[in-house]
Amino acid sequence: MMDDFISEDDLLTFEGFLKYQAVDPAMLTPDELAMWRDFFDEAVGLRESGPKVGLMRLRQAPGEEKYGVALRDGSELWLTMWVRCSAKGEIFVMYPRADAGNPHASYHLDGTYHHKSYGSTGIRQTKQPLSATLKGSEHLGMYMGHGKSTGAVCDPKAFDGLVIVDPGILGPKHGSVGVDFVAPGYEATWSRDIADRFYFGGVVQGEIFSRSPRPSVAITIQR
């Protein structure tokens, strides 16, 4: 429901902040309400003083491809994540960040798949090797926590493909982006049973970017 959606702009209000935290102000004592007000003021201060990415100037490398997800806000586009396909065939799911954390997921030629942030590896899995023998598809995860507070301005010309998402779908708490890697010739079958296999019928938008003879990149948006 649109009424339940919490945007980053909502987080700039005390009422929206409490809703995001699932706190009912009517159930708070005056002291507790004052405590939450302090938390809110601190969160807003950190957001306003934090570094902003600005216009994303992504390096162009020969043989590399990029597929982005951008949030539409009036006439503006804000980049929330992108998929980078290296010239040698490896896959990286990237987030725009102004700090040095560099959160990303990577899918390597030998099938190693992991998430990394601030130099530490989190989720680690073994998938099919990225070669001509790849069959069917490989799921690279569901990514939540979207918004424009990073200040990452999207330049559509920097991407080989771009999924533009309207307001009210992706936010700090609601909505997710699915990324899948689909073998050539399997795209039609993958599209038909996508809801049954991964996304439980919640897909509201999606696109498959063909890269034949290499596997395609599929990006899906869930409310």
Image (cartoon, helix red, strand yellow):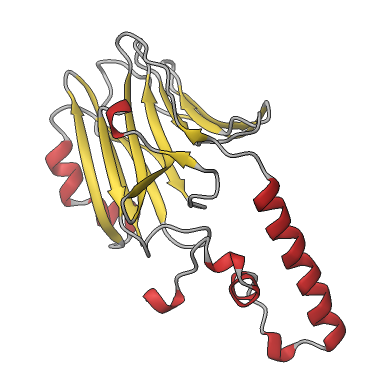
Which residue is situated farthest in the front direction here? 75
The answer to whether 186 appears left or right of 21 in the picture is left
Q: Position of residue 13 (x, y in %)?
A: 61, 71
Residue in the foreground of this view, choosing between 113 and 18: 18
Please name the residue shown 71% across and 51% down the image.
46
Please name the residue shown 38% across and 31% down the image.
83
Q: Position of residue 92 (x, y in %)?
A: 44, 26
Up-down relation of residue 64 to residue 28 (above or below): above
Up-down relation of residue 222 to residue 40 (above or below): above
Residue in the foreground of this view, choosing between 75 and 113: 75
In the rendered image, which quarter contains the C terminus?
Answer: bottom left
The answer to whether 21 appears left or right of 64 in the picture is right
Which residue is situated farthest in the right direction here? 31
Please name the residue shown 80% across and 68% down the image.
38
The answer to which quarter of the image holds residue 115 is top right
In the rendered image, which quarter contains the N terminus?
Answer: bottom left
The answer to which quarter of the image holds residue 130 is top left
Up-down relation of residue 155 to residue 220 (above or below): above
Q: Position of residue 192 (x, y in %)?
A: 15, 50
The answer to which quarter of the image holds residue 213 is top left
Please name the residue shown 54% across and 68% down the image.
10
The answer to whether 70 appears left or right of 204 in the picture is right
